[in-house]
Image (spheres, rainbow, N blue to C red):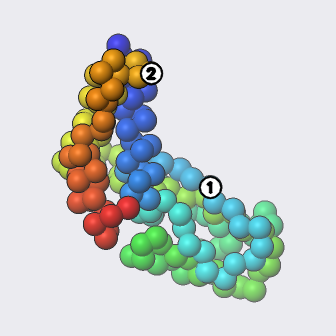
Amino acid sequence: WDAFLVDKIGAARELVESRLGRTIYATKFRARWSKEQTELTIPRPPLLIDGDHPFTVTVDGETVPGSDLEINEDAWPATVAVSGGRTGAVVCEYWAGQLPGSRISRRLKSAMLLYVTHLFENRGVLAADATAVLPKAFETLLASESHNGGY
């Protein structure tokens, strides 16, 4: 059952991240904008920037120096103002989520465990008695972790 459970834990994480619009564990992303942007809204918050998790912006393949970037990590989602008069396609490579080794909140962990338990107990395509409904506590736990009480 190990492979099955690992797959369902991954599904739970993806569902929770998708519903809340944020990243739980440190993950590397690449965002692209097809034309010049003076302010970038960085998807999948929270932004993670430190010595092990770099943040780079390129315009038409040319790296923008850090002195030409004004990063607002406190915004949700984070924003980056690009100066220097560059034009062209923008690519941003960044990390989002919590630092490796950080603990996720008990509510998110409980929500994911509820989801994994539900998937394990209802492994078939259809439940035999048609009662395979995700526990309401799952939705309540997610709402309690969102910024606005919903998602």
Q: Secondary structure at mark 2?
A: loop
- Residue 34 seen in render: yes
Give the residue at x 77% y 80%.
86
Residue type at tag 1: Arg
Mark 1, secondary structure of its residue: strand
Q: Position of residue 24 (x, y in %)?
A: 37, 50
Residue drawn at the location 41% of the way across and 54% of the way down? 19
Q: How dense is the environment of label 1, judged by Cα within 10 Å: few (below 14), some, or many (20 and up)? A: few
Quarter assignment of residue 125: top left
Q: Nearer the viewer, mark 1 or mark 2?
A: 2
| C-alpha separation, residue under disc 1 versus residue under disc 2 | 35 Å
Query: Which residue in the protein does label 1 denote?
Result: 30
Residue at the spot 42% in from the left edge and 34% down from the top edge: 10
Hey, what amino acid is under mark 2?
A: Val
* Precedes in sequence: disc 1 or disc 2: 1
* Relative vertical location of residue 20 with respect to residue 83 in this rendering, above or below: above
Q: Which residue is mark 2?
A: 125
Q: Quadrant of residue 22?
A: bottom left
Quarter of the figure with the C terminus: bottom left
Viewer-proximal residue, 138 or 35? 138
6 relative position to 117: left or right:
right
110 sits to left or right of 133: left
Picture coordinates of residue 79 (x, y %)? Answer: 52, 76
